[in-house]
Image (cartoon, rainbow, N blue to C red):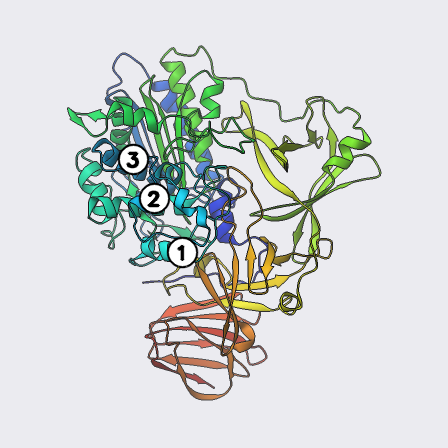
């Protein structure tokens, strides 16, 4: 295992790189150096009576341009029509070191596109009469429980449609550089100590843990491991012979390597198999798409009943109590069963996005037109959704289903109109979401400005927002606009922007209005300004390679009564030892809102948050020049030591180690015994990984 980290120093981010990569895929990447050349494999196939040359030519140019504008080492794509793969091609290399070209057989981690496989697995069991979508989860996972009594109302359907009420995602060891086991059962154990975020079926907000529990339903009902069931019942019948779950290291050269800051990484293992663990190729994904196009059947083999396919593609939001975005129609496993970009052109398209720490994918199926596209690549920044829309729109034109591509919307907002004092005052205030806290203020010129709380101060996000003739507030130089939405007693600021190919607008609740609360207790006040460090990630964790392990609690002066985590989540104390969920934001900005739990230990108060365990930095032992026998934690948590006044470091008898500077910015890392040169004028923190209760030798000179 090779672990590579940033060696340059950087500020502790207010929203972690991991969250940006996963939750803001379209914004996460940086502009990179253009790739030289591309590899073509089976550039076009039998296109029947339709000539797709124009679609393929345009797509090739668009993909190469996207790669040149983002740090994407390779992209793979396939387009299907009926029973035919019209086009399959790869661009770039799987390895910038050897310059080995990617091929149509190269595996990519498809991330949350895996959710469609989880839903398919459940529907196979439904077809066999073994699972009822509207039966409680407890009917199948007998030992499933949570602290909120309403957990008994969670149905299997709710797991597959993001409406269960689970807090969000168990991020502990979800992405690693080594295969691990037990993630799904660990998630069930974690949920047993959690409350629901909202009532089951009340609203739909993106939730990875729902699909992890669907994975557990499959295991309990089928009596076999989830990966084995999907392989036996879906992959093998569909002849998806290369697609697989990361149960072991893949053969060298069979997959596209991920890159972090330009440095090649090892294989990324996604431990959450049901929610995001499958590796596949666009070519094989076309066989999965063909099964849906033909009503659950392919090559004479019926995988699903037509009723099951129709159920997966039906709108699951119709009975939600809180649904401020009715244009966002979740299916079972699908993000949308009426993808807005294709719907604007007059076509019903099922769509699923997928992102991991390093890969981004899009899977689109238009059942009635028998068209499908899958695109995947080694970054989150190349605009997979925009490319997928563009390819399908061009294909529809080549197929003579539309006469021309939709006209692109102008980037400039509509004309400004005068806003009343009431309209301006209504939007003023504080709003919170998974991304932290936003403040909207009115200026002397009757415009609005948005600020985000970052590193203990307000920083401008948008300014000069004026009311426009369409009822939204926008700046002159921006296509992004905002307005207030009141739904069922909940007040949101909604953000709207030009989306996808650029011919339609999408609106989504951005944050929920929050008011001042009762003053926090002395117990919580004593924790403000203190820091804790993450200690229960495996040494192969991608999280540790991407993110600072530090967590600091603070209070926003203008919002008394709350506790804030590093510019991320706003927390409302429930008692002296726990916070409670209080935000209800549908779709995406209300995801992964977790409770913070305080546990008293012999060496101080430890924190539990989102599956992660943190120990107080103040409890970390300091060592200086000399040889020290450091005992590792008896419970398997990472041991940390504070290094002072030394110029050289040597370590022995351990599996792995990570070195941080005094601000917990990553310096370097390695496996087994190691050494490093230190600056004697600075202090460092050292993470040690080894067998529980064993001793590692640390020598400072």
As drawn, which residue projects farthest toward the left? Answer: 300
Instruction: List x then y, in percent, for residue 120.
Output: 28, 35
Taking the spot 43% from the left edge, 54% from the top edge, the residue there is: 171
Q: Nearer the viewer, residue 640 or 258?
A: 640
Query: Is 43 left, or right, of 504 in this rendering?
Result: left
Q: Is residue 456 above or below residue 163?
A: below
Circle 2: is it few (<14), some (14-19), or many (20+) Cα within 10 Å? many
Q: Nearer the viewer, residue 73 or 360?
A: 360
Indicate the secondary structure of the residue bearing disc 3.
loop
Instruction: List x then y, in percent, for residue 375.
Output: 37, 34
Q: Nearer the viewer, residue 537 or 281?
A: 537
Circle 3: is it few (<14), some (14-19), or many (20+) Cα within 10 Å? some
Circle 1: is it few (<14), some (14-19), or many (20+) Cα within 10 Å? some
Q: Earlier in the sequence, mark 3 or mark 1?
A: 3
**What is the number of the mark on residue 137?**
2
Query: Is 516 left, or right, of 137 in this rendering?
Result: right
Q: Is residue 83 above or below residue 427?
A: above
As drawn, which residue projects farthest toward the front? Answer: 149
Q: Where does label 1 land, which residue?
A: 192
Q: Where does label 3 land, which residue?
A: 132
């Amino acid at each position: 295992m090779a672990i590579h980290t940033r060696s340059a120093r950087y500020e502790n981010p207010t929203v972690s790189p991991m969250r940006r990569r996963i939750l803001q895929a379209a914004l996460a990447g940086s502009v990179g150096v253009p790739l030289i050349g591309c590899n073509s494999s089976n550039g076009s196939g039998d296109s029947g009576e339709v000539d797709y040359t124009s679609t393929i030519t345009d797509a090739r140019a668009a993909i190469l341009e996207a790669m040149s504008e983002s740090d994407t080492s390779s992209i793979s794509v396939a387009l299907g029509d009926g029973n035919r793969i019209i086009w399959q091609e790869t661009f770039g290399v799987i390895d910038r070191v050897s310059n080995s070209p990617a091929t149509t057989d190269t595996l990519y981690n498809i991330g949350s596109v895996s959710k469609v496989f989880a839903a398919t697995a459940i529907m196979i069991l439904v077809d066999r009469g073994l699972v009822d979508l509207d039966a409680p989860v407890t009917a199948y996972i007998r030992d499933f429980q949570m602290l909120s009594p309403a957990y008994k109302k969670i149905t299997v359907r709710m797991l597959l449609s993001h409406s269960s009420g689970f807090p969000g995602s168990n991020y502990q060891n979800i992405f690693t550089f080594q295969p691990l086991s037990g993630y799904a059962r660990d998630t069930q154990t974690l949920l047993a100590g959690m409350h629901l975020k909202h009532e089951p079926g009340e609203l739909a907000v993106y939730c990875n843990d729902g699909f992890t529990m669907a994975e557990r339903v499959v295991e309990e009902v089928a009596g076999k491991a989830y990966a084995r069931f999907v392989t036996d019942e879906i992959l093998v019948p569909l002849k998806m012979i290369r697609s697989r779950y990361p149960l072991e290291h893949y053969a060298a050269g069979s997959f596209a390597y991920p890159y972090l800051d330009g440095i090649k990484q090892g294989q990324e293992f996604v431990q959450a198999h049901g929610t995001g663990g499958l590796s596949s190729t666009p070519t094989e994904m076309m066989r999965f798409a063909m099964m849906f196009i033909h009503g659950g059947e392919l090559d004479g083999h019926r995988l699903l009943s037509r009723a099951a396919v129709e159920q997966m593609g039906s709108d699951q939001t119709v009975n939600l109590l809180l649904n401020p975005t009715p244009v966002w129609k979740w299916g079972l496993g699908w993000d949308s069963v009426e993808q807005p970009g294709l719907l604007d052109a007059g076509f019903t398209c099922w769509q699923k996005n997928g992102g991991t720490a390093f890969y981004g994918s899009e899977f689109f199926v238009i059942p009635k037109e028998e068209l499908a596209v899958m695109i995947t690549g080694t970054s989150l920044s190349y605009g997979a959704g925009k490319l997928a829309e563009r390819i399908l729109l061009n294909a529809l034109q080549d197929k003579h289903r539309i006469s021309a591509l939709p006209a692109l919307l102008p980037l400039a907002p509509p004309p400004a109109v005068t806003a009343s004092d009431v309209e301006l005052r209504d939007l003023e205030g504080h709003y919170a979401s998974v991304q932290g806290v936003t403040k909207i203020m009115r200026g002397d010129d009757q415009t609005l400005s948005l600020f985000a709380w970052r590193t203990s101060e307000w920083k401008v996000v948008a300014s000069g927002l004026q009311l426009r003739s369409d009822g939204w507030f926008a700046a002159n130089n921006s296509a992004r606009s905002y307005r207030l939405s009141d739904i069922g007693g909940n007040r949101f600021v909604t953000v709207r922007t030009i989306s996808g190919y650029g011919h339609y607008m999408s609106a989504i609740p951005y944050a929920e209005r929050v008011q001042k609360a009762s003053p926090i207790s002395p117990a919580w006040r004593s924790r403000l300004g203190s820091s804790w460090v993450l200690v229960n990630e495996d040494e192969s964790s991608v999280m540790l390679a991407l993110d600072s392990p530090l967590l600091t609690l603070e209070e926003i002066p203008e919002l008394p009564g709350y506790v804030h985590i590093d510019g991320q989540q706003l927390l409302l104390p429930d008692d002296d030892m726990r916070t409670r969920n209080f935000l209800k934001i549908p779709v995406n900005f209300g995801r992964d809102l977790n409770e913070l739990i305080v546990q008293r230990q012999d060496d101080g108060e430890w924190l539990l948050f989102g599956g992660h365990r943190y120990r107080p930095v103040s409890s970390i032992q300091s060592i200086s020049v000399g040889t020290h026998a450091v005992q590792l934690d008896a419970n398997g948590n990472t041991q940390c030591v504070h290094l002072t006044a030394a110029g050289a470091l040597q370590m022995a008898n351990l599996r792995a180690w990570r070195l941080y500077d005094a601000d917990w910015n990553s310096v370097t890392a390695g496996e087994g015994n190691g050494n490093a040169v230190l600056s004697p004028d600075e202090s460092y923190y050292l993470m040690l990984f080894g067998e529980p209760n064993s001793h590692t030798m640390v020598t400072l000179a």
